[in-house]
Amino acid sequence: MRAPQSRTKSSSAALAPPVAAIRVAVRRALTELSGAGPVLVACSGGADSLALAAATAFVAPRLGRRAGLVTVDHGLQPGSAERAEAVAGWASGQGLDPVEAVPVRVDGRTGGPEAAAREARYEALVDAARRHDAAAVLLGHTRDDQAETVLLALARGAGPRGLAGMPERRELAGVALLRPLLDIAREDTRTACAALGLIPWDDPHNVDPVYARARVRADALPALVRALGPGVVDNLARTARQIAADTAALDELAAAALADVRAAAGGLAVEALAGLPPAVRTRVLHAWARELGAAPAALSHRHVAALDALVTDWHGQGAVHLPGGLPVVRRDGRLTT
Ligand SMILES: Nc1ncnc2c1ncn2[C@@H]1O[C@H](COP(=O)(O)OP(=O)(O)OP(=O)(O)O)[C@@H](O)[C@H]1O
């Protein structure tokens, strides 16, 4: 086990450009934050979240905000409890408070081990945020994580919502999750840790070729950089930001359009739907299907295309079955259940 350790910080360490850039990013995120509670850094002990925790410990008190840290012990590797305790001990030494090392149970959940660990981790983070009435949980995803996410989304045909990548901010069960480092290169978090005398923990899963993300990290992205130049990572991340902004605008248009196309007798009016631009119409249908109870994770492009065909390619076809078995039919000029 390699635990974070800190040497005495020299004044030149504080001036290292990546240290400064990460502090600026954290300052920006905290300045925009409403709510009086503490922020909690979600920290694995890896370079990204360790650099985030160090920057937050520096910046938050200067903004008059309390900052704490939560490290989750998934119990999946020998020595994981000791590693979590070492991260917690380091955090307390940095003045972070509250600090928690939370053990979670990963087995007995559905999905693969990676998804189960993630689900357990987010449950623990949300639970800690609620107990401490936290204003937000801070996550250490970097620009490189964002570029990997976009490539993975592109490869599986995830559509604009996937290509928008990870948002800087989202709510999970009423808790704000922030990603202040989405503009910071992963390498800079390592440099910042080194400049601060911190020794990060390297998660073996990050280099295990069993995982698609690890293969993208080790092979696909470096190959793209070699072929197309070093701007690729930044360009992928920037593209995600642009698509996220476009997607948010289209979602707003779709929310307004959904209200307009509701039929007085229930369901949606086909004629009104047909008059919408396809990008708005498919979002209206997606939102309506969710409203009817279709689980977002199971609702695919195929379902939405079949609903759309009831509007634009009507030839008397039968019901469209949404996830969960819910049938939608076209009747009397309406889409209805
Ligand atoms: N064991 C942990 N304890 C606390 N926080 C963690 C832990 N592991 C990861 N995190 C948080 O999640 C961030 C992303 O980590 P990682 O890339 O390993 O997870 P991920 O599964 O890709 O995350 P996501 O589910 O958000 O895509 C880290 O920077 C850190 O903030």
Image (cartoon, helix red, strand yellow):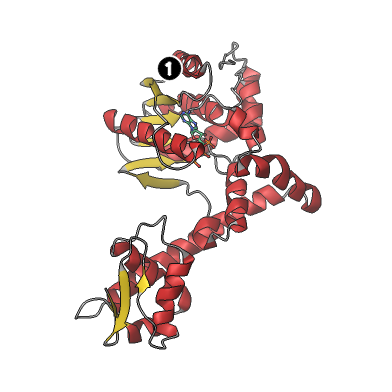
Q: Is residue 101 above or below residue 48?
A: above
Residue at image point 39% right, 28% down:
105
Quick check: 203 above or below 323? above
At horizontal 44% and vertical 65% (from top left) the residue drawn is 249
Q: In front: 320, or 103?
A: 320
**Residue closer to the observer: 311 or 327:** 327
Q: Secondary structure at mark 1?
A: loop
Which amino acid type is marked by label 1? Gly
Extreme-left residue of the structure: 265
Q: Residue furthest top?
A: 8
| Picture quadrant of residue 196 | top right
Mark 1 burial class by Cα count in 10 Å: few <14, some 14-19, many 20+:
some
Say if 207 sits above or below 102 in the image.
Answer: below
Residue 19 seen anywhere in this rendered image of the structure: no
Identify the residue at horizontal 54%, vertical 59% (top origin). 158
Whether 225 is drawn above or below 292: the answer is above
Left or right? Give the position of 187 relative to 179.
right
Quadrant containing the N terminus in the rendered view: top right
Q: Quadrant of residue 319?
A: bottom left
Residue bearing the label numbered 1: 95
Q: Count of labels shown?
A: 1
The image shows residue 193 at horizontal and vertical percentages of: 61, 24
Where is residue 266 shown, x and y percent of the image?
21, 77
- On-image quarter of the C terminus: bottom left
Q: Check mark 1 vs ligand 1: CB closer than 8 Å? yes or no.
A: no
Q: Quadrant of residue 304?
A: bottom left
The image position of residue 286, as x and y in percent, is: 39, 67
